[in-house]
Image (tube, rainbow, N blue to C red):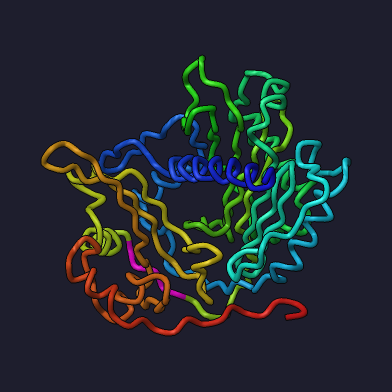
Amino acid sequence: MKHAVIRSLSVSLWTRALILVAALLAFRALSAGAAEPRRGHSEYLASLTERSLREGFGRDSVPLLAPVAGPGRDVVAKRLLERVGGKQTVLGPRLALGALKAAPRDHRVTSYIGDAGYVDVFADGTKLRVRGNLDDPKEIEKAGGTRLEKADLEALGRRFVKEALGNLITVGSQESLTFLGARYLVNGGADVDAKKDTEQVVANIAIFGREVNGIAVVGGGSKVAVWFDNSRQPVGFDVDWPAYRPTARVQRVIAQKALAARVAKTTVPIEGPEAARVRRFECGYVDLGATRRSATIQAGCSIAWENRGEGGEISAHSEFVPAGESVLKEKRWPLATAVAAGRIIDTASPEFVRYLGGPKPPGDAPEKGPGQ
């Protein structure tokens, strides 16, 4: 029963963390060319939107990438169990989880649960999360009440990725780990900035992404979040990090004006008076994450915007718009498949809803990894 309670508490915190990670990627309303970054965003993240608004994709062509299949959930779970087992671990004392018991078998996730935390591994082993017991009141009090600032979090996170995560995260010779920003988990709910002095910070979260040959990877893939308590001890981490292989195929990318026109026709304008509704615009390789990853990673842009109803209510929206001249069909990226077929559809229209209900092309299997 105690296992179930800890699991429930941790899942609750993870739900709140999803809010934080989503908030990381949101911006204040943008004018037609200048971003106003929110507190906690890194300079890199702010400049990515500014550059994408100004230049579009910024390149005439890109080599397509092929994600290499991971070693498998059971293999990665075994590696994690070796790292969190016992009282001494390179991951830190709050991630020394001791003996963990296997949760009931699930075709989506391999899980191990214990009194001090849990391990989850998804898909082909390229997505995982490890969590200590964030709700332990003694540990929260012991860690103190002073949150970690952004610069400290970046340095701590980079060191943890390099020294503790080892072969779970490989940064290739033509790749770089990019710092996206800092977020905070507080008692009583999610506060993206933890501004109030009365709020007690439970976890300080450093979030990272990746560039390949200077091109950002946008979407759920290529993301790492490292969680620290106020005493700088790691209390958890989340990883969605495949290996990429450059292919011999090159995709031409449409110019900025043509890209802006495609974005306007499928979502909302990024130029002109209506651009004030846009809160994020990032161009790069689109990796939708482990459970939605395609066999080929192609060029596109992530856009997030708001709609204001007649009563003043605000609804948030996001979409990925393909940026190639010749777009590849992707089973889990309906707009890319539509554009590949020559159909430029407004994603807010009934036509697109009908399109979503139609048949989709079969998905390709990712390239096999070693030993697969």
In magenta stretch: residue 253:
yes
Residue 38 x, y percent position in the rendering: 42, 32
Front-most of 219 and 355? Answer: 355
Front-most of 106 and 368? Answer: 106
Q: How many marks?
A: 0
In magenta stretch: residue 3:
no
* Left or right of 178 in this view: 74: right
The answer to whether residue 84 is above or below residue 328 is above
Outermost residue to the left: 310
Query: Magenta span covers which residues?
Result: 251-255
Residue 175 x, y percent position in the rendering: 64, 58
What residue is shown at x 70% (from left), y 41% (from top)? 132
The answer to whether residue 144 is above or below residue 184 is above
* Left or right of 365 in this view: 57: left
Rendered image quadrant of residue 145:
top right
Residue 59 x, y percent position in the rendering: 44, 62
Residue 60 x, y percent position in the rendering: 42, 67
* Left or right of 167 in this view: 246: left
What residue is shown at x 53% (from left), y 67% (from top)? 291
Residue 195 makes an appearance in the image: yes
The secondary structure that most of the magenta stretch takes on is loop
* Quadrant of the drawing holding the C terminus: bottom right
Front-most of 164 and 124? Answer: 124
Rendered image quadrant of residue 329:
bottom left
What residue is shown at x 78% (from left), y 52% (from top)? 100
Rendered image quadrant of residue 33:
top left
What residue is shown at x 73% (from left), y 68% (from top)? 74
Residue 176 makes an appearance in the image: no
* Left or right of 144 in this view: 360: left
Front-most of 195 and 53? Answer: 195
Outermost residue to the top: 197
The answer to whether residue 353 is above or below residue 358 is above
